[in-house]
Image (cartoon, rainbow, N blue to C red):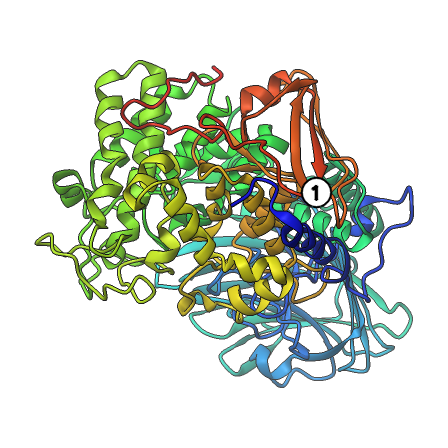
Amino acid sequence: MPWLGGNRLRTAGAVLAAALLGGTLTAPAAQAAPPGGHLTDLVNPFIGTRNDGNTYPGAAVPFGMVQLSPDTGHSTGYGYDDSRIRGFGAVHLSGVGCGIGGDLPVLPTTGDITATDNAKYAAAYTHHGESARPGYYRVGLTSYGGITAELTATARTGRQRFTFPATDKANVLLNSGQSLHKTVSTRVEVLDSRTVRTAITGRGFCRDTAPYTVHTLTRFSRPFTAYGTWRGGKVAPGSRDSTATGHNGAYVRFDTRKDRTVEATTALSYVDAAGAARNLRAEGGSSFERTKAAADAAWERRLAVVRTQGSDRALRRTFYSSLYRSFLAPNIGGDVDGRYTGWDQRPHQATGFTYYQNWSLWDTYRTQTQLLSLLAPREARDMALSVLRIDKEGGWLPKWGYGTVETNIMTGDPVTPFLTNAYRQGLLTGHEEEAFAALRKNADRVPPAASPAVGREANVPYVKNGYVPYIKGRPHTKPGDSDFDHGASATLEYALSDAMLAQMAGDLGHRADAGRYAARALNYRTIFDRSTGFFRARDARGAFTGPADPARSEGFHEGTAWQYQWLVPQDMPGMMRLIGGRDRADARLDSFFAYPRLLRDPARTARKVWVHGPYDYDNADKYNPENEPDLTAPYAYLSTGRPWKTTDVVHAALTLFTDAPSGMTGNDDLGTMSAWMVLSSIGVFPVQPGTDTWGLSTPVFDRVDLTLDRRYFPAGHFTVTAPGTSATDRYIRSVRLDGTPHDRTYLTTADLRAGRELAFSVGAQPSRWGTGDRAAPPPVGTPGAPATTARR
């Protein structure tokens, strides 16, 4: 292919840029902030609430324990196309794939209490009476004579304000027995004329799991005139206490003929009732308006770490909405006094750090982990220390943790790149050896039978033979997913983790361990089938198994051999040699992305060739921007010497993110997809998860200013510029780091710490930039890989 690409490529570039910067991202209903306005005005919390994006529009503060949001009957909380609200639940996770959370749905009603199932007493509403912004949600309920409900939050409390019609039967229903997952047992107590307490024990997330308990304490702004409880279908007026395994709850009643407003503040604790009471005293004292203003200010400070210039308003709105979702999780798990419940189900004390919980690691280790390391390093450090506490107190590192329990959802070894990333970014100072010991145990062993964790379940055959056998239908010994059900992808995930651990071991001087893990980092080769030219599952006897067609392959978790062929970020040169070299790998990438069609019509290719509907990872055979295995795939072109193709694919994929309820590609998985959008828009992306390598592509903004924590980034800021990026000028011609030519297609975190400005020069057609033999990210953690040293 000619270096400059000719008129056809110039025209295609213009079409692609126009799609990205113009029509496709435009949402007529979106209202951008006026010049000089607040960044929170740019955030649309409704993005992702349609087509199983599984986001929520309710109120939360950054990383807060409470996410107070409406539940409409959708499996994960809120569905934009639903028309009734069952209650405002206190706990939600952004973009999860299975129902979890929704604890204590609270709903205002009027009249007699005749139903105890929230599906039956749910209130109707319309989107015309609904609005949301960071830290605040409002809706007009059209049932029960018309009630306005408003929500806001602090870190550990949710505040609700209800405006009722004039009536002597204005009710607030506190449903302790229903949530988005299985409720094992609940207790509800009316403590006095203004206070209700609950203890809710639930379980389940995609599979049945160990139970967890959350304690709540709700304080009303004024005394109620009547109260009662229900158990099953039986309502008991005047009852103060009810315990049940099914429908269970309490109602309180107010006279709103003179004062139509009732406020309620609910505090949570995963420790005990006393913890909920302390959280309520510490955070529940402000007025609703002051709490709302404080939540907005917290979000403004968080969003302001990234300032953008250029692009259209719809793209900025989509960008800041993605940045907002990237800061929703993990969540504070400890009380105001530092107490938290560990994975041994006992109370512990966090001293010198904040304890966090909720770990969608199979998803977040690829994007959101790195974004938080860059933009929220202090919180990211505490998150890494929290994961180490899980190992110390629960006996093993987590895979997918919810609240105080392991769910074992998803496969592979995602905790290793999560922690090695923290180490490489300088977030584990003083804890390096502690982290390495926990990771070494996880990498070499299997959790004992009594442990709820599955860890690297298939370690024994993997260490012995170099691959995870695919054993279809193998009985599960513990709840959750099994690596044996996904032997091919588990092999690739284990090998990736081994590479990152080898790098850490080498940094710390553990040479023997470094050598062992580096050798295991090449285990991706054990499942390469030379007869097909693709990775393929092997059975327990070593034979390749399942269909030879890579589009119909088995043994890959939520994907195919086509999609997983690029999940070798530790050794892209070696993987491409298996395929037949860079040119053949480039041709295969072109087929994978439908690149010729992409050049003709990028937006249509993204929506008609790549994506066919929500959750199409169950049947899509090639590039699928809706799911995690393909998140780094567009950056594989950096290793073929055609970096401009990375820009083409990335910018086409960005058109899938829009300012509309359906504007999320796939489900968000606790900020994973949102972080992909943010990083790819800036032009700096973590191409080797688990280390500190950032691949480059053309930014979509003329200028991005990052305000960085001086404790980790001494300069305190970093600027990315691409002046003149437009429909006709969007390919990288040159890059300069602090004025010095930079011909590599990647940076390291050390570059970000030492530099102040990354300047892109862009043009209408590809150039020779980034095409040299040493321009691509080098292998990591494999035999012969370049030695590097992390910031200590």
Residue 456 rendering spot, x and y as whole percentages: 26, 44
Q: Residue at x 33, y 27 (%)?
A: 781
Relative to residue 258, is residue 127 drawn left or right? left
Numbered disc 1: secondary structure: helix
Relative to residue 202, is residue 671 drawn left or right? right
Badge 1: residue crowd in 10 Å (few <14, some 14–19, many ≥20): some
Residue sitting nearer the eye, 633 or 508? 633
Relative to residue 402, is residue 324 drawn left or right? right
Q: Residue at x 89, y 45 (%)?
A: 37
Residue 442 rendering spot, x and y as whole percentages: 27, 36
Residue sitting nearer the eye, 375 or 88? 375
Count numbered badges in the picture. Answer: 1
Q: Residue at x 16, y 57 (%)?
A: 544
Residue sitting nearer the eye, 732 or 518? 732
Residue 239 rendering spot, x and y as whole percentages: 58, 72
Residue highlighted by disc 1: 283
Residue sitting nearer the eye, 438 or 156? 438
Residue 373 rendering spot, x and y as whole percentages: 56, 32
Where 692 falls versus 201 (above or below)? above
Looking at the image, can residue 763 be seen?
yes
Where 328 falls versus 56 (above or below)? above
Residue positioned most to the left:
541
When asked about the image quadrant of residue 504, the answer is top left
Relative to residue 113, is residue 649 drawn left or right? left
When asked about the image quadrant of residue 36, the answer is top right
